[in-house]
């Protein structure tokens, strides 16, 4: 996977300092972002990567696995495709608009910009959704 187009961007374009977001989204924005489970699951996945980078297909696979923990529906190729399309068309643009991620549609790569306030709430939602983990 080629992440060069994401890595080579000037980080100051994203209000970053030392790889972390310096602009905190409003609470309304944060709660809106966290209201959708597929967005949360994508963020859990991105947060778990060392460099915050992932391609959309990997995110879709991971989101499907998170969903499988909460219901009995089998993970199918059509479900993965549905999730990938929804990530591309809906969730990643919404996260990018909030300066949480950068999504390069040409390479299909996503980069998560570290956001401490968001991470606090992600920790709480993860605990509430998956208390045994």
Image: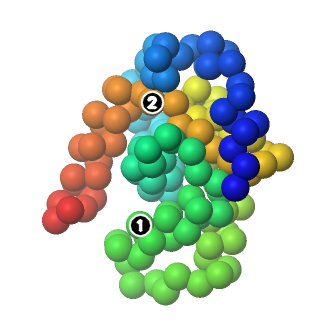
106 sits to left or right of 92: right
Provide the secondary structure element on which disc 2 rests. Answer: loop
x then y, percent, for residue 64: 51, 70
In this orientation, which residue lies closer to the viewer: 99 or 107?
A: 107
61 sits to left or right of 22: right
In this orientation, which residue lies closer to the viewer: 106 or 35?
A: 106
x then y, percent, for residue 30: 43, 31
**Residue pictured at 45% horizontal, 48% vertical:** 49
**Residue pictured at 28% horizontal, 34% vertical:** 120
For label 1, count other residues whose C-alpha is less than 10 Å away and answer few (under 14), some (14-19) or many (20+): some
Quarter holding the N terminus is bottom right
Residue 25 seen in the current view = no
Name the quadrant containing residue 11. top right
Figure disc tally: 2
Quarter holding the C terminus is bottom left
Q: Tell me if residue 89 comes above or below residue 33 in the rendering.
A: below
Q: Which mark is residue 114?
A: 2
Q: Tell me if residue 21 comes above or below residue 42 in the rendering.
A: above
Residue 116 seen in the current view = yes
Q: Which residue is mark 1?
A: 66
Measured Cα–Cα span from mark 2 to mark 1 = 21 Å
* Dot 2 or dot 1, earlier in sequence: 1
**Residue pictured at 57% horizontal, 28% vertical:** 98
């Amino acid at each position: 996977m080629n992440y060069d187009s994401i890595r080579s961007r000037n980080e100051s374009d994203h209000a970053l300092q030392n790889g972390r977001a310096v602009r905190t989204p409003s609470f309304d924005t944060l709660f809106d972002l966290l209201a959708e489970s597929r967005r949360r699951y994508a963020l859990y996945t991105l947060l778990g990567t060392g460099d915050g980078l992932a391609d959309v297909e990997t995110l879709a696979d991971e989101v499907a696995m998170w969903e499988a923990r909460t219901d009995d529906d089998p993970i199918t190729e059509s479900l993965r495709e549905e999730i990938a399309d929804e990530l591309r068309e809906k969730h990643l643009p919404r996260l990018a608009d909030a300066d949480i991620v950068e999504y390069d549609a040409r390479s299909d790569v996503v980069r998560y910009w570290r956001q401490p306030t968001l991470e606090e709430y992600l920790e709480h939602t993860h605990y509430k959704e998956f208390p045994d983990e």
